[in-house]
Image: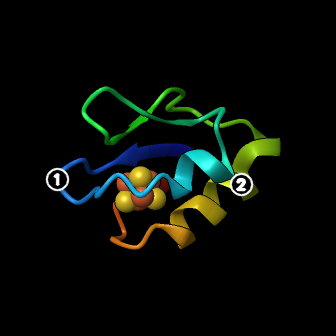
Amino acid sequence: MKVKVNRDSCIGCGACAAICDEVFEIDDEGLSVVKKEVVSEEKKQEVQDASDSCPTGAIEVEE
Ligand code: SF4
């Protein structure tokens, strides 16, 4: 699974980092950045939850 954040859509709410801080982090600009683009099996569900929780649909998940 691969994950990307569309920073043009991100509003920096922090939900993704709260759900999965191994993959998402809020950077100096106050926007989400992906720390690990390729996600392991055990983190898949967390990343999916983060994507589902993103209020602007900024998280793209690719199987
Ligand atoms: S949940 Fe969405 S809007 Fe909120 S910080 Fe993460 S990517 Fe940005």
Residue that appears at 39% across and 45% down: 4
Secondary structure state at the residue bearing disc 2? helix
Is tag 2's residue or tag 1's residue first in the polypeptide sequence? 1
Give the residue type at disc 2: Glu
Residue situated in front as seen by the camera: 44 or 30: 30
Quarter of the picture holding the N terminus? top right
Residue at which label 1 appears = 8
Residue that appears at 64% across and 37% down: 21
Q: Quadrant of residue 57?
A: bottom left
Cα separation, mark 2 vs mark 1, equals: 22 Å
Q: Can residue 59 be seen in this view?
A: no
Question: What label does residue 37 carry, if any?
Answer: none
Local crowd size for mark 1, using a 10 Å CA cut-off: few (<14), some (14–19), many (≥20): few
Residue 35, horizontal then vertical, whole percent: 50, 26
Secondary structure state at the residue bearing disc 1? loop
Residue at which label 2 appears = 46
Residue situated in front as seen by the camera: 29 or 7: 29
Residue situated in front as seen by the camera: 31 or 44: 31
Residue that appears at 83% across and 43% down: 42
Q: In which quarter of the image is residue 9?
A: bottom left
**Colour style of the rendered protein structure:** rainbow
Residue that appears at 65% across and 65% down: 49
Q: In which quarter of the image is residue 52?
A: bottom right
Residue 54, horizontal then vertical, whole percent: 46, 67
Q: Is residue 35 visible?
A: yes
For residue 48, side relative to residue 42 (left or right): left
Residue 62, horizontal then vertical, whole percent: 48, 54
For residue 21, side relative to residue 5 (left or right): right
Where is 17 relative to 29, above or below?
below
Figure disc tally? 2
